[in-house]
Image: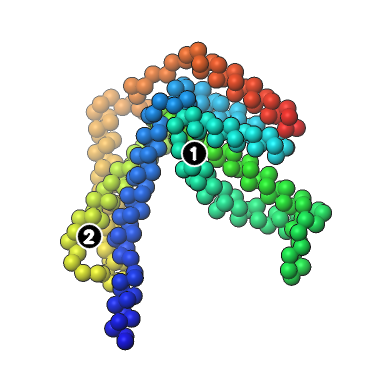
Amino acid sequence: MNQSNQSSRLNSRTSYIERTLVDINNALEQSIFTEKVARQKGLLQKLDPRIKIISLIMLLFAVSLSHHLAVIAVLYICTLILAALSTAPVDFFIKRVLVVVLVFTGIVALPALFITPGPVLVNLPLGIVITRTGAMTALFLLLRVGTSVSLAFLFILSTPWNSVLKAMGVLLIPDVIILVLGMTYRYIHLLLHTANDMFLSRKSRILRRMSGAEERRLMAATSGTLLGKSLQISSDVYLAMESRGYRGYPRTMDRFQMRWFDWVAVLIVGFVTAAAIWFGR
């Protein structure tokens, strides 16, 4: 009886290495998918990245300054339409935003339902009351955050990361911050690939299910090896950059050029922002 229970627990428990491999592969697939969408021929992909980052800031201001749910809802619907016109899967787009909104913002917005004074909307057991003012406050917060996250996610989804970094120069961000962001993004990819290879090679050499203590020792050894590799790679990459002419700011082959539809997009976004602020007063 004890042996059967022990074997069932071993069979039901997923190996730590297998779970780690699945998580790493999922992260790599999501990243590859984002770059794939950014290089498709959609509406937003055709615009100059500098125009997109300025338009993003303008629309975020419009969302934050609006005091009417209908105006924010219209902006959110416009975001979904732009996502569809930019060849981004709308269902994937909505799911990713909903996870962020419900998990993080929902926790913050939930107490507002009960602690905000106002007319009673719903009476719950144990004397708990949901007020109409609290419900409106929570709804405003959720819709604002959802629309803002959707706009930012759409910008990232429709723009290659290198173009995003280069376009940030329009905001007069220091070069060192842009460089750190770019290197961090590339190092995350590199370390994920390295960790994936290490776990896969280790898994191919294991002939039995490991105990919890053995998995922990394996994790500690793998983390130390990965740290040593990352330090060595960082030194090699910096020397390679200096030998290729790096002098404080990376140069890319992408050249931004304003075209007529970029100016039209600026005018449209400016009109939408002004209208949203005016009707949302």
The x and y percentages for residue 261 are 51, 16
- Figure label count: 2
Residue 237 location, quadrant: top left
Q: Is residue 167 visible?
A: no
Task: Please name the residue shown 27% across and 51% down the image.
Answer: 196
Callout 1 touching callout 2 (CB < 8 Å): no
Q: Is residue 254 above or below residue 100?
A: above
- Mark 2: secondary structure: helix
Q: In the rendered structure, which amino acid carries the disc numbered 2?
A: Lys
- Closest to the camera, between mark 1 and mark 2, is 1
> What is the spatial separation of the Cα atoms under label 1 and label 2, in whole angstroms?
37 Å
Q: Is residue 124 left or right of residue 53?
A: right
Q: In the rendered structure, which amino acid carries the disc numbered 1?
A: Val
The residue pinned by badge 2 equals: 203
Q: Is residue 22 left or right of residue 115?
A: left
Residue 119 location, quadrant: bottom right
Q: Quadrant of the N terminus?
A: bottom left
Q: Earlier in the sequence, mark 1 or mark 2?
A: 1
Between residue 179 and residue 264, name the one nearer to us: 264
Between residue 180 and residue 80, name the one nearer to us: 80
Mark 1 surroundings: few (<14), some (14-19) or many (≥20) residues within 10 A: some
Q: Quadrant of the C terminus?
A: top right
Q: Is residue 163 left or right of residue 222?
A: right
Between residue 84 and residue 217, name the one nearer to us: 84
Q: Is residue 2 above or below residue 268?
A: below
The residue pinned by badge 1 equals: 90
- Mark 1: secondary structure: helix
Task: Please name the residue shown 62% across and 22% down the image.
Answer: 270
Q: Is residue 206 above or below residue 169?
A: below
Q: Is residue 250 visible?
A: yes
The x and y percentages for residue 192 are 31, 47
Task: Please name the residue shown 68% across and 29% down the image.
Answer: 276
